[in-house]
């Protein structure tokens, strides 16, 4: 075998070994401590964006707050064994006393529409935001 290819092969191996684990941008004995920070931004819109709300047996609305676009029909559905509740809005619209089934209301204009159960008061309340 000719000595030149053998020397070339040894030089390539020596170069590869010297590049293996050090970072030449830091002096010997210096540790490169790099921290990467990721920022996540969360935007909330007042709760859910679902037009479907469940009247729960626990005397609550789920979700209690929802945001919908104008023209949306929002539906309140009584869960099994939910008992008697009302969906009564501050503007006077009401479902009356209901223990099963569904109550619906269409929201055509932007605004905030708070509601509550007349039987349970403020402890059972919610809000529909239209925008």
Image (cartoon, helix red, strand yellow):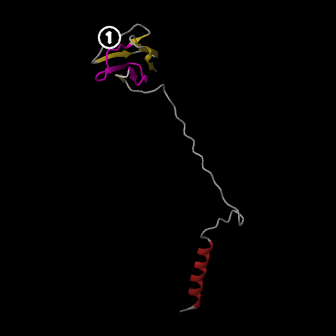
Q: Quadrant of residue 11?
A: bottom right
Position of residue 58 measured from the top left corner of the image (x, y, whole percent): 37, 22
Say above or below: 93 vs 20: above
Q: Quadrant of residue 30?
A: bottom right
Residue at the farthest bottom position: 1
Residue closer to the observer: 37 or 12: 37
- The answer to which image quadrant residue 75 occupies is top left
61 inside magenta stretch:
yes
- Residue 108 versus residue 13 in the image, above or below: above
**Residue depicted at 67% across the width and 66% down the height:** 24
Q: Residue at x 66, y 59 (%)?
A: 32
Residue count near mark 1 (Cα–Cα under 10 Å), binned few <14, some 14–19, many ≥20: some
Between residues 3 and 104, which one lies in front from this camera angle?
A: 104
Is 46 part of what is drawn in magenta?
Answer: no
In magenta, the rendered stretch is: 59-87
Residue drawn at the location 33% of the way across and 16% of the way down: 104
Q: Is residue 39 left or right of residue 84?
A: right
For the point 60% across and 75% down, which residue is it? Answer: 17
State the residue position of label 1.
Answer: 97
Q: Secondary structure at mark 1?
A: loop
Q: Number of labelled discs?
A: 1
What x and y, as percent, mark residue 59? 38, 20
Q: Is residue 100 left or right of residue 8?
A: left
Q: Residue 66: where, in percent of width, then height?
A: 43, 23
């Amino acid at each position: 075998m000719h000595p030149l290819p053998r020397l070339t092969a040894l030089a390539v191996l020596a170069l590869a070994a010297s590049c293996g684990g050090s970072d030449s941008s830091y002096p010997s004995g210096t540790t490169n401590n790099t921290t990467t920070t990721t920022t996540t931004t969360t935007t909330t819109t007042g709760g859910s964006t679902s037009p479907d709300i469940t009247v729960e047996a626990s005397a609550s609305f789920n979700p209690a707050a929802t945001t919908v676009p104008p023209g949306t029909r929002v539906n309140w559905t009584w869960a099994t064994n939910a008992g008697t509740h009302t969906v009564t809005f501050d503007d006077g619209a009401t479902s009356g006393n209901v223990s099963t089934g569904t109550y619906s209301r269409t929201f055509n204009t932007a605004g905030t529409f708070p509601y509550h159960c007349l039987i349970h008061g403020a402890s059972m309340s919610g809000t529909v935001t239209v925008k």
